[in-house]
Image (tube, rainbow, N blue to C red):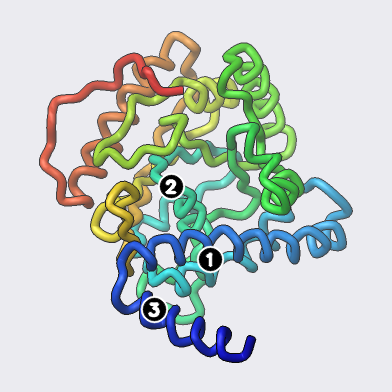
Amino acid sequence: MDALLVFLLLLVPLLLWTSSTFVFYFKKCFYVAYMMILAAIAIPLSILKSGGRDIENMRVIRALVRHVKYFLGLRFDVSGLEHLQTEGPYVIISNHQSSLDVLGPVTDPPTDPFQPPGLMEVLPDRCTMVAKKELVYAGTVGIVCWLGGIVFINRKKTRDAKSVMADAAKTMLDDQIRLWVFPEGTRNQRGDLLPFKKGAFHLAVQAQAPIIPIVFSSYSNFYLRKEKQFNSGTITLKILPKIETKGMTSDNVADLSDKSYDLMRSVFLDISGSAPVTQSNGPSLHH
């Protein structure tokens, strides 16, 4: 048994040094397992802090998760933080590439004004996310997401999703909270943005709350799922000026969605170093 343990202790570093495929699976497994462990720690802390489901538990989650990026060799280069200094409720929209996205909203708060911006806090206070309903069944991660006040929607039932969004708009105003939504509706690593679904924009218009777009650069320079590559890298995260929705009605939702899509896609291609191709915010075939 001792010999086997010694063999494994020697083999793992060797494979991490020589095999990019092994690094890919090792980092993926580590990320999932470690997040499960952190969630298990966050559950009792959240219950002790708030007594149950409460958006204030996002502070606990943020504090526990913010160091994970270092283990994965990732750095966030953030600009536009001043745009999050907006009073009252608002809707954040961002592109969605993988579960690594959750590390962006929980980067470290600044302790030195001259630190690199990637170490600064991004997720605002009293802000939670909108996520697919299936996430609630993801073991300890699902439980802590529920405790953090995350809004779960059933993407397969449009009527249910609209009802949840309408309730979320009321909650935003009543409780003065912010919501983070991924308008593409699913993970996307195709090197461009998918057409936006309209839920986030109906939400913002119903609440008459501004929209703050946030764009993550492409992960393709360090994370390639099909090629089984997961290297160290820097993610550029750009926070854009708010888009006002006061006075808008449901008739303005389509134009609001198109405007947001065009703006975010232009920024995505710019910060990712991608060449633009013709694409519009048309009907999406992705669910």
Q: Are marks 3 and 1 in contact (CB under 8 Å)?
A: no
Q: Confirm or deny contact between disc 1 and disc 2 (CB under 8 A).
A: no
Under mark 2, the amino acid is: Ser
Q: Quadrant of residue 256?
A: top left
Front-most of 86 and 194?
A: 194
Query: Label 2 neighbourhood size at 10 Å, few (<14), some (14-19), many (20+)?
Result: some
For this rendering, which residue is in front, 153 or 169?
153
- Numbered disc 3: secondary structure: loop
> Taking 48 as reference, is 243 above or below it?
above
- Res. 199 mark: none
Toward the top, the furthest residue is 251
Q: Indicate which label's residue lies in the foreground, 1 or 2.
A: 1
Q: Earlier in the sequence, mark 3 or mark 2?
A: 2
**Circle 3 sits on which residue?**
115
Instruction: Write down the residue under mark 1.
Output: 30
- In depth, the one of 158 and 223 nearer the eye is 223
State which tag comes first along the sequence, 3 or 1: 1
Q: Is residue 167 above or below residue 134?
A: above
Q: CA distance from mark 3 to mark 1?
A: 28 Å
Q: Position of residue 79 (x, y in %)?
A: 34, 59
Residue type marked 3: Gln
Residue at mark 2: 98
In the rendered view, tell whether residue 254 sits above or below residue 40.
above
Task: Compute the Cα span from label 1 to label 2.
Answer: 15 Å
27 sits left or right of 66 in the view: left
Looking at the rendered structure, the kind of residue marked 1 is Phe
**3 or 2: mark nearer the eye:** 2
Horizontal and vertical percent position of residue 103: 49, 59
